[in-house]
Image (cartoon, rainbow, N blue to C red):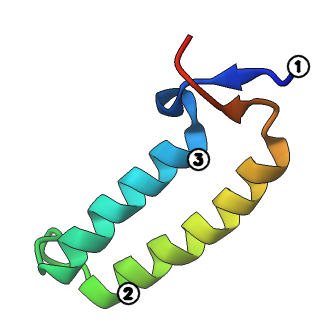
Amino acid sequence: MLDTKAWWQSRTIWLNIVATVFAVLGAMKLLPEGLEQDQVVTAIMAIVGVVNFVLRIATKHAIGPAQ
C-alpha cells in the first residue's frame, strides 16, 4: 500500500502557493520598493523550478485523502 498524506502536508504544494503569491504581487507591482519587479518574479520562478524538481525526487508519500 502507498503511504499517503493530506495535500496541506506537501512541501511542493506550499512552495507553489508561495511562488504564486509572489508572482501575483509582482504582476500587480506590489512588491516592496527598490526591487525590480520583473527580475524578482523571474528569479522566483527559476528557483521554484529547481526546488520542485528536488522535492519531487525526494517525495516518499503520495497525496491522498485526509486520514
Q: Please report contact status of discs 3 and 2: CB closer than 8 Å, yes or no.
A: no
Q: For label 3, count other residues whose C-alpha is less than 10 Å away and answer few (under 14), some (14-19) or many (20+).
A: some
Q: Which mark is residue 10?
A: none
Residue at 12% across, 79% down: 28
Q: Which of the two marks, 3 or 1, is nearer to us in this view?
A: 1
Q: Position of residue 15 (x, y in %)?
A: 49, 50
Would residue 36 be found to the left or right of residue 40 on screen?
left
Q: Position of residue 23 (x, y in %)?
A: 31, 72
Say which residue label 2 marks.
39
Of the image marks 2 and 1, the number of the one nearer the N terminus = 1
User: Residue 6: image x %, image y %?
Assistant: 54, 25
Marks 3 and 2, how far apart at CA: 23 Å
Give the class, few, some or many, for how many residues have Cα within 10 Å of label 2's Cα (few <14, many ≥20): few
On residue 1, the disc is: 1
Task: Identify the mark nearer the N-term, 3 or 1.
Answer: 1
Dot 1 amino acid type: Met
Residue position marked by numbered label 3 in the rendering: 12
Q: Residue at x 48, y 78 (%)?
A: 43
Q: Which label's residue is closer to the chain start, 3 or 2?
A: 3
CB atoms at circles 2 and 1 under 8 Å apart?
no
Task: Report the side of 51 relative to 36 (left or right).
Answer: right
Q: Is residue 26 above or below residue 62?
A: below
Vertical side of 54 occupied by 20: above or below: below
Q: Residue reaching furthest top?
A: 67
Foreground: disc 3 or disc 2:
3
Taking the spot 57% from the left edge, 77% from the top edge, the residue there is 46
Q: Is residue 26 left or right of residue 19?
A: left
Q: Residues within 10 Å of mark 1 (few under 14, many from 20)?
A: few
Q: Amino acid at mark 2?
A: Gln
Q: Secondary structure at mark 3?
A: helix
> Toward the viewer: 39 or 67?
67
